[in-house]
């Protein structure tokens, strides 16, 4: 089997073949490492490729298979981790010169669970410094490019993970999502990205567990792999208040997409606090929505007044960055990303009253969104208003929509993502088509609080009707 076929193999298939001794963890890991080096030259998806650690973990996984030991649910399956998430004995830099030599002693909880399940850590994928913007570049490593068009951004802030998934660098990739940072690159790179219900996967790295709106979660090529990965990473842990008391639903079964969507009412909407999108993206989205009706769902226009949530997300986020990184900015000076320093300065002017008003608005937003699901079972939106923007775009400047000037990216490219960071609802993006220029377009499915399984099932049914995993970028 070629390195390419091994690299694009799903986790579900890899687990089956490893257990049947048709492929070995060492063979699979070596193939992915070779591909990682090649893709790195084109797209710059990694800050660290952990060859020695990967080969050592693959050898242990293989020894367990050959010895007939009890095997983990991900025995020998390669995975990558965004470099915002701690990995024991492998550098975690946060994309910052201030942490260029940082080697954590322990794994973050979700990573520890993946490794305990037998998964093999290949390396750490790129992120803008501290994940602060929707394009992936940082002074520490440079710029990450979209494999479908090397002049476009990979999206961010989990851009390296999106590229790794799209280019077949193993099946499982850990991203983070504080305003869309898993779903933006997944949509821009033509793969699956999920932001699960708040607390489903414990977040032990946040500085504010009670007010957390950041998520650690999966980026994969298929929905079934997403469900498998989420199932392994999920479950309560004392580090995260929102995780406690949670019982996991059958995420693996839901992600197989068995059956149909009969008796499911799906509300769909073109806009969410915005009023513009590109015509080709809109046409692809509206065509894709009809697939849910073909699967048996009852479709209805979901038309409600909805205010942009950026006005609440921004003061909470920028003031947090200011509080956390001011001392580092003083130390690093121009070695810190200029855009991060810019938004930290904006955060410095945010008052305590403004923060309290944003917290209050977040509660109102949760109640508003949760109320939608008394009338519908799921909500479907676009993920982005257009495909990937130019790689060198300044995220403080307006973008173009059909050759007309729009607003800045947070307001006009991904208004559909940050509302659900604030509210905590589960949301998944899946590919729903390609533009005439060959760029992927994503569709977002959102569910009620804790309805991760329902979201996965709808996504898997859509995938069965409109498969995408056979599309491979020519990198």
Image (cartoon, rainbow, N blue to C red):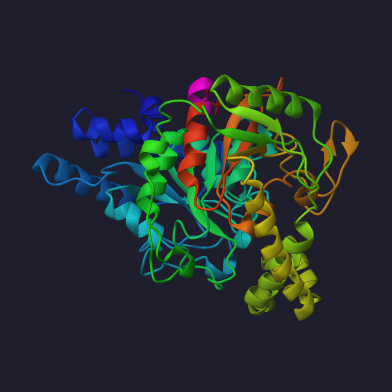
- Would residue 404 be seen by someone viewing this image from the given angle? yes
Residue at x-position 79% and y-position 53%: 308
The residue drawn where x is 38% and y is 32% is 10
Q: What span is colored magenta in the figure?
A: 462-468
Q: Is residue 337 left or right of residue 430?
A: right
Residue 230 versus residue 243: which sits nearer the camera? Answer: 243
Nearest to the observer: residue 123 or residue 70:
70
Give the percent coordinates (x, y) of residue 229: 39, 45
| Residue at the farthest left position | 67
Say whether residue 369 is left or right of residue 256.
Answer: right
Q: Residue at x 55, y 46 (%)?
A: 160
Q: Position of residue 20 (x, y in %)?
A: 18, 30
Tell me if 253 is positioned left or right of 379 in this view.
Answer: left
Q: State the residue in front, 365 or 153.
A: 365
Residue 322 position (above or below residue 288): below
The part of the image, by quadrant, that contains residue 111 is: bottom left
The answer to whether residue 146 shows anywhere in this view is: no
Q: In the rendered image, which quarter contains the C terminus?
A: top right
Question: In this rendering, would 105 be left or right of 328?
Answer: left
Q: Position of residue 53 (x, y in %)?
A: 32, 53
Looking at the image, which residue is at 68% across and 74% down? Answer: 329
Spot occupied by residue 64 in the image (x, y as percentages of width and height)? 15, 46
Quadrant of image for the N terminus: top left
Q: Is residue 384 magenta?
A: no
């Amino acid at each position: 089997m070629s390195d390419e076929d091994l690299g694009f193999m799903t986790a579900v298939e890899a687990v089956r073949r490893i257990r049947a001794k048709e492929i070995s963890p060492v063979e699979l890991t070596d193939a992915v490492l070779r591909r990682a080096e090649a893709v790195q030259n084109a797209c710059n998806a990694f800050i660290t490729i952990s060859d020695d650690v990967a080969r050592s973990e693959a050898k242990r996984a293989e020894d367990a298979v050959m010895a007939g030991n009890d095997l983990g649910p991900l025995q020998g399956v390669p995975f990558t981790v965004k470099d915002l998430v701690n990995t024991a004995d492998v550098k975690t830099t946060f994309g910052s010169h201030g942490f260029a030599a940082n080697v954590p002693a322990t794994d973050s909880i979700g990573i520890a669970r993946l490794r305990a399940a037998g998964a093999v850590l290949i390396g750490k994928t790129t992120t803008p410094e501290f994940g602060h913007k929707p394009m992936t570049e940082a002074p520490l490593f440079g710029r990450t490019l979209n494999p479908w068009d090397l002049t476009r951004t990979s999206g961010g802030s989990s851009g390296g993970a999106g590229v790794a998934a799209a280019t077949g660098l193993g099946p499982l990739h850990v991203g983070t999502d504080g305003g869309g940072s898993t779903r933006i690159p997944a949509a821009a790179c033509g793969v699956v990205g999920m932001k699960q219900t708040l607390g489903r996967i414990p977040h032990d790295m946040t500085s504010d567990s009670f007010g957390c709106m950041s998520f650690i979660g999966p980026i994969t090529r298929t929905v079934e792999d997403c469900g498998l990965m989420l199932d392994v990473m999920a479950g309560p842990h004392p580090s995260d208040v929102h995780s406690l008391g949670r019982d996991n639903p059958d995420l693996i079964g839901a992600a197989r997409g068995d059956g149909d969507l009969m008796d499911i009412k799906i509300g769909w909407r073109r806009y969410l606090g915005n009023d513009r999108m590109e015509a080709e993206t809109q046409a692809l989205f509206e065509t894709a929505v009809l697939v849910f009706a073909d699967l048996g769902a009852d479709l209805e226009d979901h038309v409600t007044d909805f205010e942009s949530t950026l006005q609440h997300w921004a003061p909470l986020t920028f003031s947090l960055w200011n509080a956390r990184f001011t001392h580092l900015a003083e130390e690093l000076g121009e070695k810190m990303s200029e855009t991060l320093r810019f938004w930290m300065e904006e955060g410095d002017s945010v008052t305590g009253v403004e923060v309290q008003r944003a917290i209050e608005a977040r509660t109102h937003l949760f109640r508003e969104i949760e109320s939608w699901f008394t009338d519908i079972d799921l909500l479907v939106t676009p993920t982005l208003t257009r495909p990937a923007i130019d790689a060198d775009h300044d995220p403080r400047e307006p973008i173009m929509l059909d050759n007309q000037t729009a607003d800045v990216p947070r307001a006009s490219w991904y208004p559909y993502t940050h509302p659900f960071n604030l509210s905590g609802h589960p949301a998944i993006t899946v590919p729903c088509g390609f533009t005439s220029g060959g760029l992927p377009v994503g569709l977002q499915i959102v569910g009620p609080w804790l309805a991760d399984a329902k979201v996965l099932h709808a996504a898997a049914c859509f995938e069965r009707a409109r498969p995408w995993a056979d599309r491979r970028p020519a990198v």
